[in-house]
């Protein structure tokens, strides 16, 4: 029995020594499983950090979930002149909380919040399209867009939009993706042309992906 116990102790010591040596080598050489463990920790900590930041912002802007007076939930797409307090989505009451003066001459394209197909516009002249970004969405498609030097603050349950990017488009048809996948990215439009003709091309009602009975608060 004693000899068996001694062999077991020696085996445990050997296994622990091997585990220590392998851990040391994998950390120093950054081989498997070091990279996987490190990426997993970074992913989890990054996600927790974003959630904590979102919570902090919602606590700061206590009226973020207050329904504004102009809000009437409609499952359509609209092009409207931007004014302070206007709802950014056609079917949600969320609005911008900061730098309204920077958006004074802008138009906003009000999408359903979870709209899922491309948006087609026609412009009679050059325009600049602005998209608001949320860290929880996939923003790779905006890699070649220019970052804007001011922020906005559109707060919802699933996304907080504060960074803006922009891109210039020439006269003619403009096709924009909705963004996502968590939420459609808000769209703003500006132009130095006073007599600009900007239209949203016809969209069949059946392509809206959010059923009418779900067009309520999230």
Image (cartoon, helix red, strand yellow):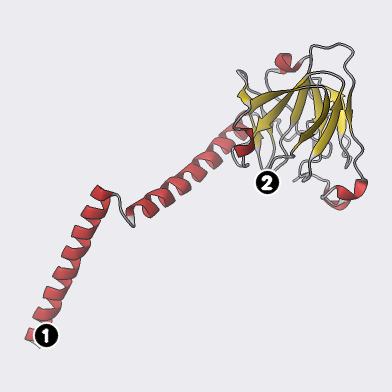
Count residues near mark 1 (Cα–Cα under 10 Å), then give few for <14, some for 14-19, many for 20+.
Answer: few
Foreground pick, 98 / 111: 111
154 vs 31: above or below: above
In the displayed orientation, state which residue is furthest to the bottom: 1
Q: Nearer the viewer, mark 2 or mark 1?
A: 2
Q: Secondary structure at mark 2?
A: loop
- Of residues 165 and 113, the one drawn nearer to the viewer in this rendering: 165
* 143 or 188, nearer to the observer: 143
Residue 46 visible in the picture = yes
Residue 39: percent from left, percent from top? 42, 49
Q: Which mark is residue 181?
A: 2
Instruction: Where is residue 34? Give x, y as percent.
Output: 33, 53
**Coordinates of residue 209 in the picture (x, y in percent):** 82, 50
Residue at mark 1: 4
Q: In the image shown, does 156 or 134 lie closer to the viewer?
A: 134
Marks 2 and 1, how far apart at CA: 60 Å
Q: Is residue 119 left or right of residue 204?
A: left
Q: Residues within 10 Å of mark 2 (few under 14, many from 20)?
A: some
Residue 139 in view, yes or no: no
Asked if the residue under mark 1 is in contact with the one under mark 2, i.e. CB atoms within 8 Å, the reply is: no
Quadrant in which the N terminus appears:
bottom left
Going from N to C along the chain, the mark reached first, 2 or 1, is 1
- Residue at position x 63%, y 36% in the image: 134
Residue shown at the point (68%, 21%) measured from the top left: 98
Q: 75 left or right of 50?
A: right
Callout 1: helix, strand or loop?
helix
- How many badges with numbers are in the image? 2
Q: Quadrant of residue 149?
A: top right
Residue 105, x across and y down, in percent = 79, 14
In the picture, residue 5 is in which quadrant?
Answer: bottom left
Q: Residue at point 90% right, 41% down?
A: 203
């Amino acid at each position: 029995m004693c000899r068996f116990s001694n062999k077991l102790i020696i085996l445990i010591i050997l296994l622990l020594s091997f585990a220590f040596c392998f851990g040391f080598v994998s950390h120093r050489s950054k081989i498997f499983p070091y990279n996987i463990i490190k990426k997993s920790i970074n992913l989890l900590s990054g996600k927790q950090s974003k959630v904590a930041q979102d919570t902090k912002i919602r606590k700061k802007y206590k009226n973020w979930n207050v329904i504004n007076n102009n809000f009437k939930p409609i499952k359509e797409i609209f092009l409207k002149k931007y004014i302070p307090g206007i709802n950014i989505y056609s079917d949600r009451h969320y609005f911008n909380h900061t730098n309204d003066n920077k958006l004074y001459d802008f138009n906003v394209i009000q999408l359903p919040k979870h709209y899922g197909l491309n948006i087609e516009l026609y412009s009679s002249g050059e325009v600049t399209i602005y998209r608001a970004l949320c860290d929880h969405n996939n923003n790779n498609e905006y890699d070649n867009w220019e970052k804007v030097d001011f922020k906005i603050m559109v707060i919802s349950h699933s996304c907080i939009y504060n960074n803006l990017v922009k891109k210039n488009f020439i006269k003619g048809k403009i096709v924009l993706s909705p963004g996502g996948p968590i939420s459609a990215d808000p769209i703003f439009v500006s132009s130095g042309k006073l007599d600009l003709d900007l239209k949203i091309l016809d969209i069949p009602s059946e392509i809206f992906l959010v059923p009418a009975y779900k067009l309520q608060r999230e």
